[in-house]
Amino acid sequence: MTATSPARHRLNIVEHRTHREISIDQPMLLLHGIGGSVASCAPLGERLAAAGIPCTCVDAPGYGDSPDPEPGVDAADAVIELLDARWPDRPVVLLGTSWGGVIATAVALRRPGRVAALILADSTRGSGTTPEQAAAMRARIDEFRARGADVVAAQRASRLTAPDAAPVVSDAVRRSMAAVRENGFRAAADFMAATDHGADLHRVDCPTLVLVGEHDVITGVDESRLLADRIPGAELAIIADAGHVAIQEQPDVVAELVADFVGGLS
């Protein structure tokens, strides 16, 4: 079911409901990557719901059916506003992939009482870890503007999946990237370029699961290992036969790992 949140940003959300007995006490919110949308989270969301874990996916500002971002308000602010409007009295499990994981970490650091647990899939500290990485991320805005989403998707999408990814997955990744809007991408890239959570990871004060595809060449296994090492008590799982979009390539495996993780929260 698709709906809009009552928050000021009116972000587009999609709910994956379950007809089984709910197995967790906390709501779960899925946050997509910089080239994704709620559709990117759908395979995992459907499997989590089938396992008895209802979850909600959200289009970031400027993505999918969400309106363009408002000046001065970043994606983490928008997520916090959504949490406060939709679940004002309940901490939420945040599952973010890539950029979505950076957003989730930012929310956990800014409003720790609102986050029951973090699941960071193929994510990173941000792209502000060095001036060169920040500049490279911002350069992607100019590339996007000059070449367009279709061309960028055709050139980059294959790097996001494992070498032997199913064609249906590769095609879904390419189509998702081709649908990205310039205003959303610009805000996302600026957010990433300005972010380096490295010095603050020790302040993450909630159970955390870090997932990464074994063939991820975008953020990489080493970066996920660093996240798991620096976040107190974090667990790390490496997903076989998956690249940067492990939640789309291996949704059954990821859903099982997530179910085991959230099952141990209560």
Image: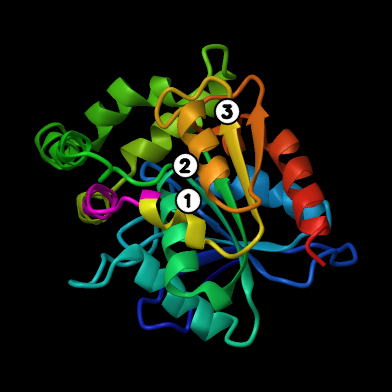
Q: Residue at x 38, y 66 (%)?
A: 76
Which quarter of the picture shows residue 175?
Answer: top left
Say which of 240 and 185 sits in front.
Answer: 240
Dot 3 and dot 2 residues touching (CB under 8 Å): no
Q: Residue at x 90, y 66 (%)?
A: 21
In the image, residue 25 lies in the stretch drawn in magenta? no
Dot 2 and dot 1 residues touching (CB under 8 Å): yes
Question: Which quadrant holds the N terminus?
Answer: bottom right
First to last magenta residue range:
188-198
Q: Type of residue at label 3?
A: Gly
Asked if residue 182 shows in the view, the reply is: yes
Per the rendering, the mark at residue 101 is 1
Q: Circle 2 — which element?
A: loop
Q: Circle 1 — which element?
A: helix
Label 3 and label 2: CA atoms lie apart by: 10 Å
Per the rendering, the mark at residue 213 is 3
Q: Residue at x 48, y 28 (%)?
A: 222
Question: Which quadrant holds the C terminus?
Answer: bottom right
Image coordinates for residue 57, horizontal then vertical, percent: 56, 59
